[in-house]
Image (cartoon, rainbow, N blue to C red):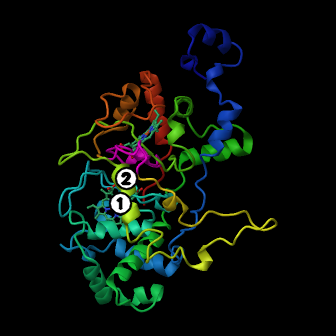
Amino acid sequence: MSTTRCRSPLLAVALSALAGCSGDALTPGELAQVLTMSPVPAPPPSASNRYADSPAAAAIGKTLFFDPGLSADGKTACATCHDPKRHFTDGERVHTALGTGNRNVPSVETAAWQTWFFWDGRADSAWAQATGPMRNPVEMGATAESVQARVRDVDAVAFGEAFGPLPEDSNLTLALVGKALEAYERTLGPGPARFDAFVADLRATGSSTVLTGDEQAGLRVFLRRGCVNCHSGPLFTDGSFHNIGVPEIAKGGMDIGRALGATAVLDDPYNCLGPYSDAHLPALIAPPATSSGPKATAHPCAELRFLDPSFPDWPLAFKTPSLRNVADTAPYMHDGSIATLAAVLAFYSTLPGTPLIGHRELTLQPLSLSQREMDDLEAFLGTLSSPAR
Ligand code: HEC
Ligand code: HEC
């Protein structure tokens, strides 16, 4: 163990002669917290998609995910931007397809565990999300009618196996195509990383050498400097929205993030409370609680029902991204404005600039990280990578 990691060199000298530096071990509280960060559990049930775990739906969903024929120019599939070889991202700052968007492409590997979709959370399920890019004029530029025609001409058999006869209503077909895409995304998952092997060892024996000294030091920085307050749990995200004050470089007007997303999701006809949702089906609604029966479970659309779009901290707030595979998915942030992980850490160290509206999350203060802490943090983030497909 290296003594260079101790805050006080004098203390380091004194302690290193005995049992090493006191800063080198996880406290019992930290150990308990680390155990909550792995493994990635099975996906929770999908509240509004009764086909979410249907193998037939996942099979046609996979076909559709890679089908450029769904797009207006016949060239753009979901996989064009969400490339499996890059953990379902594209390596670009923002993607150019039929037009140029203003947001960085996030992975779809963690879709099954998310509550809100897109950087601003303007969809409340993976299937509702999927109806977005198909109809987005700068992405795939399709319509419900053109998607219906593509499925009828090319995928009718596989569609029938999953959902029965093709509906007449093209909006319903679009919803079912979204449900198939969600079923496919649920088969992905971020895959086990070295960090998971490390935690499995800790759980079994209380110690592990799977991570190097530097990587373990980076984990301690991650815990002790508050990264884990937002990047929490096995997906390294709290699923919530924060204004961390990423310098705004969006062209064509300011991107106000969650403030727009919260309004949009309430108006979305494909949301959990809408006519295409399966949340009203008895099988998906939990039985009423009785004193001896199962614990009362929230309404399947509880998150949407209690969403307050006027929450004052929503402007410029964006969804906390998962950090699984983060070392392989540069560039970073909702607008792709930060090119490397080292630059992200430098950002947290100094927090340059001030947000154009509102203020940064008050708990977020410049961390003044040393070069050593930044290097260790970067090494730790690399342990969250799993092999690409
Ligand atoms: C032209 C590039 C492009 C195409 C094509 C595309 N996407 Fe995306 N995808 C993006 C971008 C950019 C975002 C983030 C947009 C935002 O937040 O406003 C995104 C967001 C997502 C998300 C949300 C992830 C999260 O954690 O919030 C999912 C899931 C997703 N896309 C799936 C799909 C599916 C399924 C298709 C095909 C129907 C598709 N995408 C087609 C670029 C693309
Ligand atoms: C207050 C909550 C919060 C804290 C604390 C926090 N983050 Fe973040 N993090 C976010 C949000 C929100 C974003 C996305 C912001 C955006 O795009 O505007 C983000 C983005 C990132 C990204 C970019 C990921 C990507 O795919 O684009 C990385 C890497 C990251 N954070 C690492 C860290 C590290 C390391 C720490 C500790 C030094 C930390 N974060 C502390 C909320 C937080």
- For the question of whether residue 87 can be seen, the reply is no
Instruction: Give how far across and how far down residue 227 sits, in percent.
Output: 50, 36
Ligand 1 image-quadrant field: bottom left
Q: Is mark 1 within 8 Å of ligand 1?
A: no
- Is the shortest distance between ligand 1 and the CB of mark 2 under 8 Å? yes
| Residue 316 falls inside the magenta stretch | yes
- Residue 287: give x, y in percent of width and height: 69, 72
On-image quarter of the N terminus: top right
Rendered view: 131 above or below 81: below
In the picture provided, is 20 more to the left or to the right than 254?
right
Image point 34% across, 49% down: which residue?
Answer: 257
Q: Look at mark 1 in the image and give the residue it sits on.
A: 264
Indicate yes or no whether the magenta region holds residue 233.
no
Characterize the local packing of mark 1: few (<14), some (14-19) or many (20 or more) Cα atoms within 10 angstroms. Answer: some
Residue bearing mark 2: 120
* Residue stretch rendered in magenta on the structure: 310-334
User: To which quarter of the image does residue 201 belong?
Assistant: top right
**Which residue is found at the position 45% from the left and 62% from the top?**
124
Q: At which x and y percent is residue 146? A: 25, 81
